[in-house]
Image (cartoon, rainbow, N blue to C red):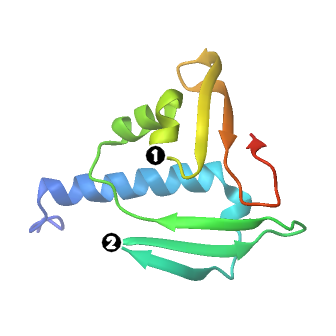
Amino acid sequence: MNKFAGFQSSDFKFMYKNLFLSVLLIWSFPSVFAQKDWKLSKEKENIKIYTGNMANSKIKAIKVECEFDARPSEIVALLLDVESAPDWIYHTKSCKLIKRVSPSELYYYSEVSVPWPVETGIL
């Protein structure tokens, strides 16, 4: 008996995308995902935003859960398109590529808007 009977190819694509994103995010942000007390702060249009405290830091951590109707290569291409960051990254005023070390490694300058009394920050 085939244990995958009843599954469509789109089901496998969906599972693959979620698995890929989960592995990518967990690998990229291990200290953030180690948090145990996430609090759901907002949910809208199938996007969930959680907040939490970072150990030994005054900075609040955020975790976002959502689903993308895109191939992993499309998501990676978006993340590597530094110049488009102000169009989709919250409060990003400008973003400029400084150096591309390899196809998957780069350095960039990013200026973000922050609320008063903090001055505009550079990351």
Report helix, strand or loop for mark 2: loop
Which amino acid is tagged 2? Glu
Identify the residue at the far front of this view: 116
Look at the picture and state if 31 lies above or below 74. below
Q: Quadrant of residue 31?
A: bottom right
Q: CA distance from mark 2 to mark 1?
A: 16 Å
Q: How many marks?
A: 2
Q: Nearer the viewer, residue 76 or 81?
A: 81
Residue drawn at (43%, 78%) of the image:
43
Which amino acid is tagged 1? Trp
Residue drawn at (45%, 53%) of the image:
21
Q: Which mark is on residue 78? A: none
Look at the picture and state if 83 lies above or below 23. above
Q: Residues within 10 Å of mark 2 (few under 14, many from 20)?
A: few
**Position of 72 compared to 99: left or right?**
left
Residue 85, position as x, y percentages in the image: 51, 38
Residue 13, position as x, y percentages in the image: 24, 52
Residue 122, position as x, y percentages in the image: 76, 39
Q: Which mark is on residue 45? A: 2
Q: Nearer the viewer, residue 94 or 59?
A: 94
Q: Nearer the viewer, residue 67 or 98?
A: 98
Residue drawn at (67%, 35%) of the image:
110
Identify residue for label 1: 88
Q: Residues within 10 Å of mark 1 (few under 14, many from 20)?
A: few
